[in-house]
Amino acid sequence: MKGEQGMQRVLSRVAVVVVAVFAVTSGCALFEDERTAKGRKLYRHYCMHCHGESGQQQEGFNWERMPDPRPRDLSESEAMSTFSDEEIFNTISRDMRDTTLQEVLDDENYFAVSTMPTFKYTLSEEELWAVVGYVRTLHGGSLTFDVEGRKAELESRFKAAETAHDQAKQAMDEALAKQEAEEAARAEAEEEAEEEAEEDDEDMDMEDDEDADLEEEDEEEILLPEEEAYEKVAEQFEAAKAAWENFSKRPRMTQIARPDLTVEETEKAVLEEKGKSLYFNKYGCNGCHSIGDVGGLVGPALDRAGFRLNDTWVYRWVRYPQGMKKHTRMPNLGLDDPDARAVTAYLDTLRAPKPDKPIPLPE
């Protein structure tokens, strides 16, 4: 009996040691809440190759190949604690802007580093906060932003907007029905009056018809007050609905249609030069892709993109990567049609000779 009790104590101590070791080596993953665990998973998929597993510099396989300024040390408590949760959130969910513009560089509220991508068009707001929460753990902090309060606020705003929308629509429908009934009654009265009226001659009839036609052409459509009110409320409702849905659902686009990429020869060089500037200075493609021996290793090398890639495919890919490959690491950077056309045109110019040896894949 004593032997069995001794063995149980030994096994218990071993179990405690194993759990402790596992907790330390896995960043205390056993004690993470659901949001932090989700943030860890997203961080490993989208961020770790540049920022490293523990947020330290030189850890990620892509770190050495990135242009300056390279990723900051996310594990450094003194520096990272100076940033609020909202500032970190805004950094990873901003719109990409042209960093060659002085106004962008001078904007203290904008993170003007092109090679740090945005995830605004890839992840839901809830997922973005989860990433912020996990980043906090890398320097011993924790998320203080009230995510649940934000969720409740968006839901309340959406429900209020939905109620106002339904009421405004009902008022508009009733007003339109009343207007239609009045117009029908007026038309019927005019028809009866015309039937009873005695016409002097045919010429007078034709003259009257012409005047009536002129009046119809000059008449402008006048919106009812209820219609104008509904249009304003409907716009507010759509904004509230989008904010609520984007909190828990990832942004989605309709499938990008096949574009006509025909360009006049006189405009081609200008478009290609614009695409080159966007590639490096706005969307920071060189942070993940290489041209020659320069640039990141996360995505494929683009030295021979002009030979290997179809223009239509490139355009659709840079507009909406997740529409082409659902779980790709490349985020949707928010390229609009003109920027996508320019970047596509630039990539088409990349036609390096075929290398003697295949480029090795990143480890």
Image (cartoon, rainbow, N blue to C red):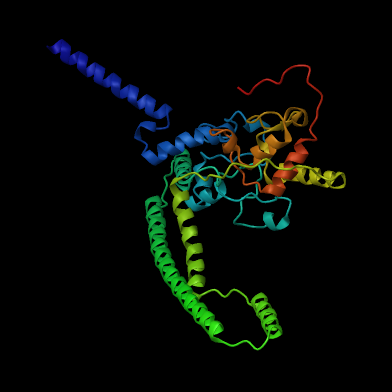
Q: Is residue 283 left or right of residue 12?
A: right
Seen in the picture, residue 246 relative to 50 is either above or below; the reply is: below
Looking at the image, residue 351 sits to the left or right of residue 174; the answer is right
Specify the farthest residue to the left.
1
- Picture coordinates of residue 190 (x, y %)? 53, 82
Seen at 42% across and 56% down, the residue is: 154
358, above or below 257, in the image: above
**Residue 253, horizontal then vertical, whole percent:** 56, 45
Work out whether residue 337 or residue 150 is closer to the camera in this orientation and state it: 337
Count of numbered tags: 0
Q: Quadrant of the C terminus?
A: top right
Please name whichever residue, 175 or 316, is drawn nearer the observer in this view of the structure.
Answer: 175
Q: Quadrant of the N terminus?
A: top left
Query: Furthest residue to the right?
Result: 266
Pick the front one: 199 or 104? 199
Residue 33 point in image, percent of width and height:
36, 39
Above or below, 231 against 338 in this view is below
- Which residue is pictured at 40% across the width and 41% down the height? 35
Residue 67 visible = no
